[in-house]
C-alpha cells in the first residue's frame, strides 16, 4: 500500500468499490468522534454467527451500548487496581481471568498462539469475500469447516467459555480482574450482558490483546538495540530517576508514564510498526463524501492504512522513515497523535490501549535496567508479514543480566 500511495497519491482505488485514503481531513471524517461510517462487511466474518462481538459489531447503537457497559473495566483507574499483575508475561490471562496461561514457565504455549495465527491468515483474505465464509458455514455439516478463521469462533472462544464457566463454579478470585467486573455489570443489567456477551469480550481480549502487544514490544526492543544512541538515552533517563528516587522496581505505571524519553520510544515504535497493517475498512454513509477533489458515493468502502499515514512525509517530515523518538519531545504530542492510527480511532478505537500502554511502559524499562541486550544475528534483520497483524520473525537476542556483565 505504501508503494501504491507513493505512485498514485493520497487516494488509491483498491477495488471497484473500495478506496484507500491518506488524506488527513478524510481520515478525521471517517474515524473521528461521532463518525457515521460503519465497519464494512470485512468484519462480518470475524463475527460469524455470534450475537455479540465488540470488535466486529457493525451496528452503531448495538456497539455503543456494549462498549458503554464494559468500558469502565478498561479505564486506567480500574487498571491501577490490577497493576501488580502487569509484570507477568501472561498479562491477558491475569487481567482477564486471573489465570496465567503458564506459557513462559513452560517455555511453550498450548497451541493457542498458532491457532490465532492460522485464524488471522484466513480472516485477512476471507474478509474480502465474506460469501466464502457463509459457504463454508452452510457446507460444514457435510464436509466440515475448511477455513482457519473458524478457530476464532471455535477453539479460542471455547477456551474463554471454559474460563467463564470455571469462574462461575469457583465463585470468585483472590484478586480483581476483568471477568469479575463483567459479572458485576451482569448482576446490574442481566439482559444487557448475558453469558455469551461476556464470553465474546473475553475472546476479544485474548485475540486482540496478546499478539498486538507482543508485536509492539518486539518493535520497541528491535528499535532500541539497533539504535544504541536511543538505548543510551533511555538508560540515562532510568539511571537519573533511580538516583533521585523517582523510579523504583518493580516499577509503577505512574512512574513509567512520567518518563518522557520512554514514552517517546513507545510512540515512535507504534508509529513505525503499527501492529495492524491493513486499512480499517468503513462504509461511506448516505450523502457520500468528498476526498480532495473526488466525490465518493455512499456505500463505497473507504479506509486508511496506518503504515501509509504514519510514514507520510507531509505529516512527519522528510525523516518520516527514520526511528527518531526525539520528534515526540519537540512537537505537540496531542497534535501528532491526531495522525496516529496505531490504536484505530473514534468510537471504534482500541478499548485495550491502557492495558497495553501499562504493560509496555512497565516492561521496557525493567528489561533495559536489568539486561544488556544484543542481536544474536545483527546481519540478518527481521522478516515481517502482514496478515492483518504485521508480525515479525527472527528477533533472536542475547540477553546478559547487567549485574553479571558488570563483574
Ligand atoms: C499495542 C497493543 C495494541 C494495539 C496496537 C491495538 C490496536 C487496535 C486497533 C488498531 C483497533 C481498531 C481496529 C479497527 O478499527 O478495526 C483495536 C480495537 C480493539 N482492541 Fe486493540 N490493540 C492493542 C491492544 C489491545 C488489548 C491489550 C486489548 C484487550 C485486552 C485490545 C482489544 C481491542 C478490542 C476489543 C477492540 C475493538 C474495540 C471496539 O470496536 O470498540 N487491544 N485495537
Image: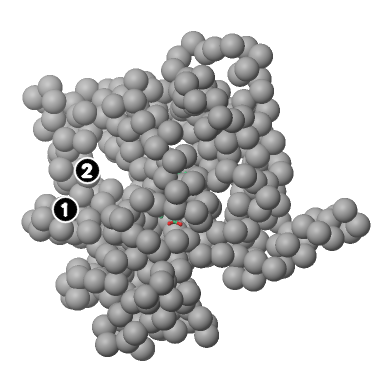
Q: Which of 36 and 407 is in front in this view?
A: 36
Residue sitting at the far right: 142
Q: If the image is split into quadrants, where does the C terminus sit?
A: top left
**Which residue is pictured at 45% across the width and 14% down the height?**
175
Q: In which quarter of the image is the N terminus?
A: bottom left
Callout 2 crowding tier (Cα within 10 Å): few <14, some 14–19, many ≥20: many
Residue 218 percent coordinates (x, y): 41, 49
- Residue lying at 17% horizontally and 72% vertically, measured from the top left: 317
Residue under numbered circle 2: 262
Whole-number angstrom distance, CA of label 1 to CA of label 2? 17 Å
Q: Residue 345, how many percent across, how many down? A: 33, 55
Q: Residue at x 65, y 39 (%)?
A: 157
Tell me the residue that label 1 is attached to: 334
Q: Is residue 406 left or right of residue 86?
A: left
Above or below for 384 versus 164: below
Give the secondary structure at mark 2: helix
Return the disc, 1 or 2, that comes first in the chain's sequence. Answer: 2
Amino acid at each position: 500500500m505504501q508503494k501504491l500511495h507513493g505512485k498514485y497519491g493520497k487516494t488509491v482505488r483498491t477495488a471497484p468499490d473500495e478506496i484507500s485514503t491518506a488524506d488527513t481531513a478524510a481520515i478525521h471524517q471517517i474515524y473521528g468522534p461521532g463518525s457515521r461510517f460503519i465497519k464494512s462487511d470485512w468484519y462480518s466474518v470475524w463475527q460469524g454467527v455470534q450475537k455479540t462481538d465488540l470488535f466486529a459489531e457493525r451496528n452503531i447503537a448495538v456497539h455503543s451500548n456494549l462498549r458503554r457497559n464494559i468500558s469502565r473495566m478498561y479505564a486506567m483507574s480500574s487498571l491501577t487496581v490490577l497493576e501488580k499483575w502487569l509484570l507477568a508475561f501472561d498479562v491477558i490471562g491475569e487481567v482477564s481471568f486471573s489465570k496465567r496461561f503458564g506459557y513462559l514457565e513452560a517455555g511453550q504455549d498450548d497451541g493457542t498462539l498458532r491457532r490465532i495465527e492460522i485464524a488471522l491468515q484466513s480472516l485477512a483474505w476471507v474478509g474480502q469475500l465474506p460469501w466464502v465464509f457463509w459457504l463454508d458455514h452452510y457446507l460444514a455439516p457435510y464436509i466440515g469447516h475448511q477455513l482457519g478463521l473458524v478457530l476464532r469462533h471455535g477453539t479460542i472462544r471455547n477456551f474463554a467459555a471454559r474460563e467463564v464457566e470455571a469462574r462461575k463454579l469457583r465463585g470468585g478470585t483472590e484478586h480483581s480482574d476483568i471477568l469479575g467486573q463483567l459479572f458485576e455489570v451482569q448482576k446490574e443489567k442481566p439482559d444487557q450482558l448475558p453469558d455469551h456477551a461476556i464470553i465474546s469480550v473475553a475472546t476479544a481480549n485474548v485475540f486482540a490483546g496478546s499478539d498486538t502487544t507482543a508485536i509492539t514490544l518486539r518493535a520497541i526492543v528491535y528499535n532500541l538495540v539497533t539504535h544504541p544512541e536511543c538505548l543510551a538515552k533511555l538508560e540515562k533517563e532510568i539511571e537519573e530517576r533511580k538516583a533521585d528516587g523517582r523510579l523504583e522496581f518493580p516499577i509503577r505505571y505512574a512512574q513509567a508514564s512520567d518518563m518522557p524519553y520512554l514514552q517517546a520510544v513507545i510512540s515512535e515504535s507504534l508509529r513505525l510498526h503499527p501492529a495492524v497493517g491493513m486499512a480499517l475498512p468503513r462504509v461511506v454513509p448516505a450523502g457520500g463524501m468528498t476526498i480532495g477533489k473526488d466525490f465518493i458515493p455512499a456505500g463505497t468502502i473507504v479506509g486508511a492504512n496506518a503504515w501509509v499515514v504514519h510514514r507520510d512525509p507531509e505529516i512527519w517530515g522528510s525523516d518520516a522513515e527514520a526511528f527518531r523518538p526525539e520528534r515526540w519531545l519537540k512537537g505537540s504530542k496531542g497534535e501528532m497523535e491526531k495522525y496516529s492510527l496505531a490504536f484505530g480511532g473514534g468510537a471504534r478505537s482500541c478499548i485495550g490501549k491502557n492495558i497495553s500502554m501499562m504493560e509496555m511502559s512497565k516492561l521496557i524499562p525493567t528489561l533495559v535496567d536489568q539486561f544488556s541486550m544484543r542481536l544474536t544475528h545483527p546481519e540478518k534483520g527481521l522478516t515481517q508479514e502482514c496478515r492483518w497483524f504485521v508480525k515479525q520473525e527472527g528477533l533472536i537476542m542475547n540477553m546478559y543480566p547487567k549485574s553479571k556483565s558488570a563483574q
